[in-house]
Image (tube, rainbow, N blue to C red):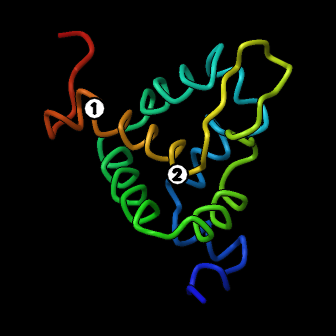
Amino acid sequence: MSRLLKCTNHEIRTIFPRLADLGACSFGEDADIFGDTLAEVIENAPQGHDLLFKQQTVNELKNLLACNDAEIDHVSFALIAISPTEEVEEPPNWGSFPTLRAFWSAILHSFENDPEVQAGREIDPDM
């Protein structure tokens, strides 16, 4: 049995602090205030975070995605308040993912393709 499957929710949030932060905001109970669809929430997730947070998030996501599906399921339950694999009625056309691995992979893609992460430096929005 994997080490992560034995971890408590608190231990998981300690191991993945940036993902826990996302679970408390973008992927929290009120995720729909961050976008009209789940895909939009994912696309907007890097916004409002500094470069270090984004880089740490990428590292945590890579570590999470190196886990097996049972570990990803267990960790996801501790980190996010939404169920990205279920079709929900409200908001309409919210969208879903076939697996939690696909959900976390989409978030990784969003963070890896963030302009600041790509440039490796903070970008002044006024420039």
Residue 127 spot, x, y in % from top left: 17, 10
Query: Is residue 96 or residue 110 the one in the foreground?
Result: 96
The residue located at (36%, 59%) in the rendering is: 62
Q: Give coordinates of residue 107: x percent, y percent.
A: 46, 39
Q: Where is mark 1, residue-wise?
A: 113
Where is residue 58 shown, x and y percent of the image?
35, 51
Q: Is residue 6 placed above or below 45 in the rendered structure?
A: below
Q: Amino acid at mark 1?
A: Asn
Q: Nearer the viewer, mark 2 or mark 1?
A: 2
- Relative horizontal placement of residue 12, taking residue 28 as reference (left or right): left
Question: Residue visible at 38% across and 33% down?
Answer: 110
Image position, residue 106 (x, y; %): 45, 37
Number of other residues with Cα within 10 Å of mark 1, as a class: few under 14, some 14 to 19, many 20 or more: some
Q: Secondary structure at mark 1?
A: loop
Q: Which of the 4 image quadrants contains residue 2?
A: bottom right
User: Most extreme residue toward the right, as rendered?
Assistant: 89
Label 2 crowd (10 A; few <14 / some 14-19 / many >=20): many
Q: Which residue is mark 2?
A: 101
